Amino acid sequence: MRTFTFHLDFVSPYAYLAFEQLPQALEGVSYAVAHRPVLLGAILKQLGHAGPHGIAPKYDWVLRQTRWLAHAHGIPLRMPAAHPFDPLPLLRLALACSDDGAVSRHVAASVFRHVWQADGDAPRDPNDADRLAALSAALSPRHDPAGPEVKAMLRGNTAAAIDAGVFGVPGFTVGRDVLWGFDALPMLRARLLGDPWFGPDSES
């Protein structure tokens, strides 16, 4: 069985799309995945990069391509009321359900869908107090989302991602290889299946 880490931030539509598409992309592959929430803003700051929202035409393209990818792959998508938004409350809530910095697929799915599959006709605020309370009740976190243990897990996940060479989300680390983006899913599949293109150095 191959193992890899999925570095994610709930603010990223591409991370959401990759999360939803992952089972189909890796169908037939024996694998184990660790879903690790990270703070994308901290990664970008470390790299001196403002993110796509800092370039208006690029950000317009991101929103358009996001909708197209959701349409093309049959993935439900409803944009939140504001984007980008502060992902910290959601990252900490997810990690409050963890003891080691990795969250279950159920937890990740619940938070992603809270953001990107909101019910109703109007866009919804992911950080609306009532909605957050309902999500927290559904997840029943083991730790206080505002507690020091949870904050330390998020810092640790983000620092480990940076140390591994992750520069954006969705980021996938397999051995020494770092793969990035929704469109890297076929490459991830090939890597997990041992495609010789990657070479022996990538196994470490």
Image (spheres, rainbow, N blue to C red):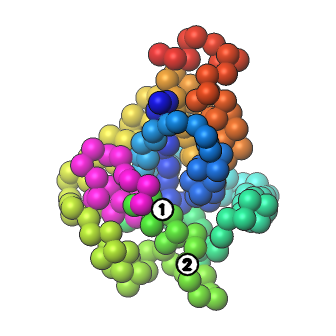
Residue at left offset 58%, top offset 73%? 117
In the figure, 50 relative to 91: above or below?
above
Residue 71 visible, this orientation: yes
Residue under numbered circle 2: 118
Residue at left offset 49%, top offset 53%? 9
Residue under numbered circle 1: 109
Q: Most extreme residue toward the front, as rendered?
A: 28
Amino acid found under the numbered disc labelled 2: Ala
Q: Position of residue 74 (x, y in %)?
A: 72, 65
Say if the magenta span includes residue 58. no
Residue 180 visible, this orientation: no
In the figure, 167 relative to 153: above or below?
above
Instruction: Mark 2 and mark 1 in contact? Answer it, CB < 8 Å.
Output: no
Q: Position of residue 37 (x, y in %)?
A: 42, 50
Q: Position of residue 116 (x, y in %)?
A: 58, 69
Q: Which residues are magenta?
A: 90-106
User: Earlier along the polypeptide chain: callout 2 or callout 1?
Assistant: 1
